[in-house]
Image: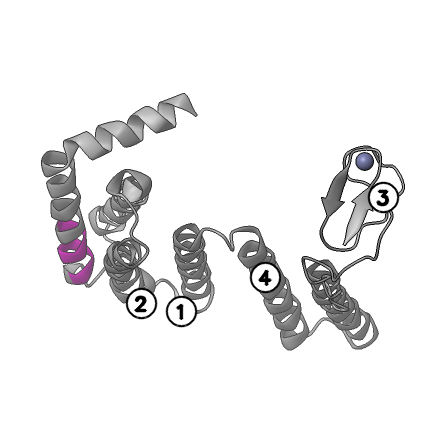
């Protein structure tokens, strides 16, 4: 065991100097108290750098092929898809510690992409009618399941419930505008989500109040 003659203390483990006076130690150094950390050759940061590099390189390759052979449909498609996957990767990295937020953002992104694809190529046939109602139904059910599994308090996730209800209710606008030719799913899902939200607002008022207090402080 090591010993500091100045402080008259014995020191366990293997130290280069006294932890109190930084003075020289006598005696035999022992084993390390904590096992030394093994250095990870592929650190988290460098892994993310590699991923970003691969995406940037892919975009450059697509752009070069596009410049040489013309920006055909699949080149543009490849560039857009690569960009979206890249953005999504960034999102996952950024919100990796908040699964519910990540899940919610992913669902909204998927809805926006489907809405765009439907608008651009199929003339708003299936998104308002089937995709968005199912997405909001899934979002509401899975938010409740995730909150239950992760033991979240209502005041911590009620903002998601309210936000989803508000966005879900906006489906009524295309119905009113006559853009949705099969309005049953949209109307039924919106009614269900609004009833669920009303139940939370009325029967769990204290949690909602605590949550709104928190947001006001922020
Ligand atoms: Zn000392």
Tell me if mark 4 has few (under 14), some (14-19) or many (20+) residues whose alpha carbon lies within 10 angstroms of its own: some
- The residue wearing badge 3 is 17
Q: Which residue is found at the position 29% from the left and 32% from the top?
A: 211
Q: Earlier in the sequence, mark 2 or mark 4?
A: 4
Q: Nearer the viewer, residue 201 or 78?
A: 201
How many angstroms separate mark 3 from mark 1 (CA)? 74 Å
Q: Is residue 33 left or right of residue 105?
A: right
Q: Is mark 3 within 8 Å of ligand 1?
A: no
Look at the magenta stretch and give its main secondary structure.
helix
- The residue wearing badge 4 is 89
Q: Are marks 3 and 1 in contact (CB under 8 Å)?
A: no
Query: In the image, which residues are magenta?
Result: 185-191
Q: Position of residue 152 (x, y in %)?
A: 30, 48
Tell me if residue 95 comes above or below residue 49 in the rendering.
Answer: above
Circle 1 sits in a helix, a strand or a loop, which is it?
helix
Nearest to the eye among marks 4 and 1: give it: 4
- The residue wearing badge 2 is 126
Q: Which residue is found at the position 26% from the left and 66% from the top?
A: 130
Q: Magenta stretch containing residue 187, yes or no? A: yes
How many angstroms separate mark 2 from mark 1 (CA)? 8 Å
Q: Are marks 4 and 1 in contact (CB under 8 Å)?
A: no
How many angstroms separate mark 2 from mark 3 (CA)? 72 Å
Tell me if mark 2 has few (under 14), some (14-19) or many (20+) residues whose alpha carbon lies within 10 angstroms of its own: some
Q: Are marks 2 and 1 in contact (CB under 8 Å)?
A: yes
Tell me if mark 3 has few (under 14), some (14-19) or many (20+) residues whose alpha carbon lies within 10 angstroms of its own: some
Q: Nearer the viewer, residue 96 or 51?
A: 96
Instruction: Tally the numbered discs.
Output: 4
Q: Earlier in the sequence, mark 2 or mark 3?
A: 3
Q: Which residue is found at the position 76% from the left and 60% from the top?
A: 30
The quarter of the picture where residue 69 lies is: bottom right
Q: Is residue 58 left or right of residue 99?
A: right
- The residue wearing badge 1 is 122
């Amino acid at each position: 065991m090591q010993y500091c003659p100045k402080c008259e203390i014995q020191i366990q483990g293997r130290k280069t100097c006294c932890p109190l006076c930084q003075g020289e130690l006598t005696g035999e150094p022992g084993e390390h108290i904590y096992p030394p950390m093994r250095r990870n050759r592929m650190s988290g940061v460098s892994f993310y750098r590699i991923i970003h590099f691969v995406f940037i390189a892919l975009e450059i390759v697509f752009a070069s092929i596009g410049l040489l052979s013309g920006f055909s449909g699949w080149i543009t498609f490849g560039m857009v898809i690569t960009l979206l996957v890249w953005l999504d990767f960034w999102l996952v990295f950024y919100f990796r510690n908040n699964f519910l937020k990540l899940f919610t953002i992913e669902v909204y992104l998927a809805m926006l992409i489907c809405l765009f694809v439907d608008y651009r190529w199929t003339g708003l046939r299936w998104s308002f009618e089937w995709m968005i109602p199912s997405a909001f139904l899934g979002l509401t059910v899975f938010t409740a399941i995730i909150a239950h599994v992760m033991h979240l308090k209502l005041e911590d996730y009620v903002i998601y419930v309210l936000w989803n209800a508000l966005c879900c209710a906006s489906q009524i606008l295309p119905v009113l505008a006559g853009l949705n030719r099969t309005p049953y799913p949209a109307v039924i899902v919106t009614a269900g989500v609004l009833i669920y939200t009303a139940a939370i607002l009325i029967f769990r008022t204290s949690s909602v109040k605590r949550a709104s207090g928190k947001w006001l402080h922020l």
